[in-house]
Image (spheres, rainbow, N blue to C red):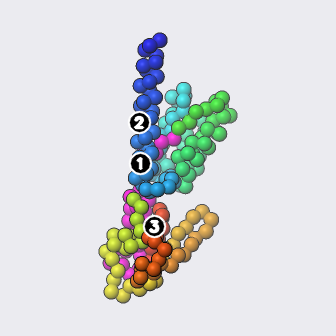
Amino acid sequence: MAWKKVCTAIFLLSFLALRAEGQQTQSIAFGDGEYFLGPEDVVQIWIWKEPDLSTTAVVRPDGKLSLPLIGELEAKEKTATQLQEEIRNKLRSYIADPVVTVIVKEVNFPKVSVLGKVHKPDMYKLKQKITVLDAIAMAGGFTDYAKRDKVFVIRKNSIQQQRIQINLKSPEKEAGPFYLQPFDTVYVE
């Protein structure tokens, strides 16, 4: 009986350590806010008392995962919590009251594009929360012909595309630093 309690305690501590590791990965990727899954991210899916269904999976380029019993499941642009809930709901057809945990194990850091009149236009990994000015600095700074008052951030989501103009000629007049989100495009005229 004591052996069973010790094993349970070790298991729970291991589980909590893995969960903390996954949460740390999420916070590294974005600072504040929740992390949204994307292609090539690695998730660990753990189903209580169902080791045959527990797995580690990579989000495919099409944004989907393939899971035992469930089959294909959309993971792209979902948080670990949203994916966890969807897996739980799908498993209810097969398992009474399933307990599911999804842990982000590896993040394929999302990118931002910096284009236009900068020295090194390219895509850059977004490993932390950065401002528009930080992204331009990563791209080697403005060229001599850049219009610092005509910097645009193009932000896409599944519904629409926004074009936000930022005046970097006098950033002190702005409301505060403008932070980029994954897959934003910065364009300097």
The residue under the point 44% across, 84% down is 149
The residue under the point 66% across, 29% down is 96
Q: CA distance from mark 3 to mark 2?
A: 31 Å
Q: Quadrant of residue 83?
A: top right
- First along the sequence among labels 1 and 2: 2
Q: Which residue position is annotated with label 3?
A: 179
Q: Which residue position is annotated with label 2?
A: 17
Residue 3 in sight here: yes
Per the image, label 3 sits on a secondary structure element best described as loop
Residue 189 in sight here: no
Q: How many marks?
A: 3
Q: Which mark is residue 25?
A: 1
Per the image, label 2 sits on a secondary structure element best described as helix
The residue under the point 42% across, 61% down is 129
Mark 2 and mark 1 in contact (Cβ < 8 Å)? no
- Magenta segment boundaries in residue numbering: 102-127
Q: CA distance from mark 1 to mark 2?
A: 13 Å
Per the image, label 1 sits on a secondary structure element best described as helix
Q: Is residue 112 magenta?
A: yes
- First along the sequence among labels 3 and 2: 2
Give the camera-side residue of 154 and 17. 17
Q: Residue 187 placed where, x, y %?
A: 45, 77
Q: Amino acid at mark 1?
A: Thr
Q: Amino acid at mark 2?
A: Ala
Task: Point out the image quarter for the C terminus.
Answer: bottom left
Q: Residue 14 placed where, x, y %?
A: 41, 31
Q: Residue furthest top?
A: 1
The residue under the point 38% across, 81% down is 117
